[in-house]
Image (cartoon, rainbow, N blue to C red):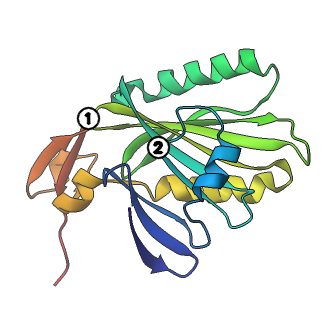
Amino acid sequence: MEENRERAGWQEVHCLADRLYLRIPEEYGRPSDEWMAARFPGIPRPQEVYSSRDGDRIITFNLLDKPLQEKQVYPAVREIERILGHVYPESVRIRARELRTEAGRIGWFSFVTGGIRADSIHCMFVLPVKDNMMLGSYHFPEGTMEADRRMFIEMLKGIRLAAVMKGNFVPITDISDSGGDFFLTDGCVYRKRIYPG
C-alpha cells in the first residue's frame, strides 16, 4: 500500500496490489491485527480495510475471482441487494443505483442493521477491476446517514483503476471529438491525457 497526501482532508491510497487507487479521509488508516480479529472474526476477512480513528467508519475492498464486466454491474448489485433483503427484511435504505466515474460504472445500495450502541448503515458497492468483481462496503452509524452518504459518494468518485493512472489515459464517451491515442480496458475506451501548454 502506498499513501500520498493529495489535498487537505483527503489522502490517496493504492490498494489491492496497486490495482485500485482511491481517496479516503485523511484520518482513516489500516487497523491493527487485533482490531481486525475483533471486528471481522470470520475467515476470510476483507482483503483491504481502512477505518476512522474511532472505528465507527469502515471501508473494505475485496477483489473476487468472479467475472464482472461493466454491463453486468447494475444487475450484479441488484442481485446482492435482493439477497441481503432476504437476510435482513425491510432493511434496504437506498435501492441499487449506478454511478458513472472515471473508473467506470460502480453499482451500490445501502441497508441498515441493528447494533448494541446504535443502528449501522452499510453501503455495498461493486465495480469491475481487470474483468473481475471488486466488492466493497462502507459502514457508519445511522445517525450520520446524510453526511456519510455524501462522503461515500465522494470516495466512489475518487476511485481510479491502475491501468488508467499508470497509462496516463482518461476515459471518453464520444470518440468522434477526442483525437489522440486510444486503448480499451475494463470495457471502456480511453484516450491519452492532453496537457495544456
- Residue 132, relative to residue 123: is it above or below? above
Q: Amino acid at mark 1?
A: Gly
Q: Residue at x 16, y 85 (%)?
A: 197
Compared across the picture, whether 100 is left or right of 108 comes to: left
Q: Residue 63, which numbered label?
A: none
Compared across the picture, whether 154 is left or right of 140 comes to: left
Quick one: label 2, few (<14), some, or many (20+) residues within 10 Å?
A: few
SS under mark 1? loop
Measuring from the top left, give residue 193's x and y in whole percent: 19, 65
- Residue 66, relative to residue 86: is it above or below? below
Residue denoted by label 2? 47
Q: Earlier in the sequence, mark 2 or mark 1?
A: 2
Residue denoted by label 1? 187
Label 2 and label 1: CA atoms lie apart by 24 Å
Compared across the picture, whether 57 is left or right of 71 comes to: right
Which dot, 2 or 1, sits closer to the camera?
2
SS under mark 2? loop
Who is closer to the viewer here, 139 or 51?
Answer: 51
Who is closer to the viewer here, 71 or 84?
Answer: 84
Quick one: label 1, few (<14), some, or many (20+) residues within 10 Å?
A: some
Q: Within the image, what quadrant is residue 147 found in?
A: bottom right
Identify the residue at the far bottom of this view: 197
- Residue 13, relative to residue 85: is it above or below? below
Identify the residue at the far front of this view: 34
Identify the residue at the far right of this view: 117
